[in-house]
Amino acid sequence: MVWWKYYLVYVAWLAFECVFVFLFIIETKNKTLEETAALFDGDDSLASIAKRAEERAYTEERGSSVCMPFGEKLSTSTTSKTVNSEEILDRGADVRSEKPDPLPYWMACLSPTCHKYPAEQIMGLRRLQRLRKIRHAVTMYVCCDDDEHGTGLINNGSDAEDSDPNPIMPIPLHLAVCLFPAVTALDYQGPMELLGFLAPENPELTRKPAHSIIADYLSHTMDPVAPISGPRVMPTGTYDGVEMQYDIILLPGGAYARPSAVPELVEFIKRQAPTLKFILSVCTGSWILSGTGVLDGKKATSNKSVFKNLQEATKDLPITWVPKARWVVDDDARLWTSSGVTAGQDMASAFLEHLIGKEDAEVIRNIVELSVKEAGDDEFAEHYGLVTSASKS
């Protein structure tokens, strides 16, 4: 009965091995995080990261491109220049890697206009907690080219855990689609066919734009909303029940789109308006807006079939109604109003360009095969006698 002694020895040896491996992993991870954090040193500003990257970068020529440390002189047959941290922050930057390593875990673009994403939207530089996912210390490279592209910072570290093919996370915007009885379905669904492409889990875009949109459908009750035509819509919340602050509201028109007909909606807009980033209205949705004070001192448009009635109803309000306009955006690009029904998609297309850029907006338009009209392309203003043929241009 000596076998149990050997069994205890084996268990003790196995426990020792587990403890040793565990301590080794912890020590390696701590060392990695210390090396990585040293690059940031508690300061996530691009200027500070760029300066500390001098100690991490190295020089390696690749034809006309060179990966080089900050401040060193670049000499090729056609180029002789010095690149320093301040210059990099001023120049356009193109994020790319000249080394045959796997795709970087995160990348940083120093220009506010290049690589499709503004610099302040690069989440990797700000989320220090994500550093724990990197197995190896970050290596920063400065890539300079002889072409019109500038310089950039990239992480060329390989073997990243949970590798993300697109580490630049879109900035979420919360949108409230405002519904009411006898709403015009195309007023909201037309724009949402475009804006819906920015939903976080939309599978139709191969790359994520700068923003994502999370939409709620609100009404005065939780009962299904019956539009003028089309299926009933189940709200996700009520005007009095939601407590969150939205970034965008989309206000469609409809048969009873008047301030007096939807008091809960009017009060909801008044509460939300001071800190809304964008306000979008389609068709007679602008008539509802006129009762909230949002349009005071602003220019706007609406459905041309009721335009004269709208002008008369709001004649005592300081609103500049634009008779000939497919859609109107106010000077601060915060307030967007469109003409009747189908004009909502034209406005939404222009809003998408403003929000995520022309290139990504064009991708979405091509997917839905949408031909849009420009802001001044309004044939219905003359049809309803709002402008004469001589003055329509």
Image (cartoon, helix red, strand yellow):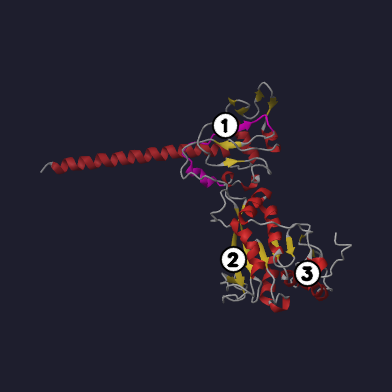
Q: Which mark is residue 98?
A: 1
User: Mark 1 vs mark 3: which is more N-terminal?
Assistant: 1
Q: Position of residue 130 (x, y in %)?
A: 51, 46
How far apart marks 3 and 2 lie (CA) works out to 29 Å
How far apart marks 1 and 3 lie (CA) works out to 57 Å
The amino acid type of the residue labelled 3 equals Lys
Judged from the image, the secondary structure of the residue bearing numbered disc 1 is loop
Q: Which mark is residue 304?
A: 3
Q: Position of residue 166 (x, y in %)?
A: 54, 46
- The C terminus lies in quadrant: bottom right
- How many numbered discs, if any? 3
Residue at left 62%, top 28%?
A: 65
Determine which quarter of the picture holds residue 41.
top right
Could you classify mark 3 by the number of other residues whose Cα lies within 10 Å: few (under 14), some (14-19), or many (20 or more)?
A: many
The amino acid type of the residue labelled 2 equals Asp
Q: Which residue bears the numbered disc 2?
A: 216
Towards the viewer: 136 or 116: 116
Question: Is 28 part of what is drawn in magenta?
Answer: no
Q: Which residues are magenta?
A: 127-147
User: Mark 1 vs mark 2: which is more N-terminal?
Assistant: 1
Q: Which mark is residue 384?
A: none
Judged from the image, the secondary structure of the residue bearing numbered disc 3 is helix
Do callouts 1 and 2 mark residues in contact (Cβ within 8 Å)?
no
The amino acid type of the residue labelled 1 equals Glu
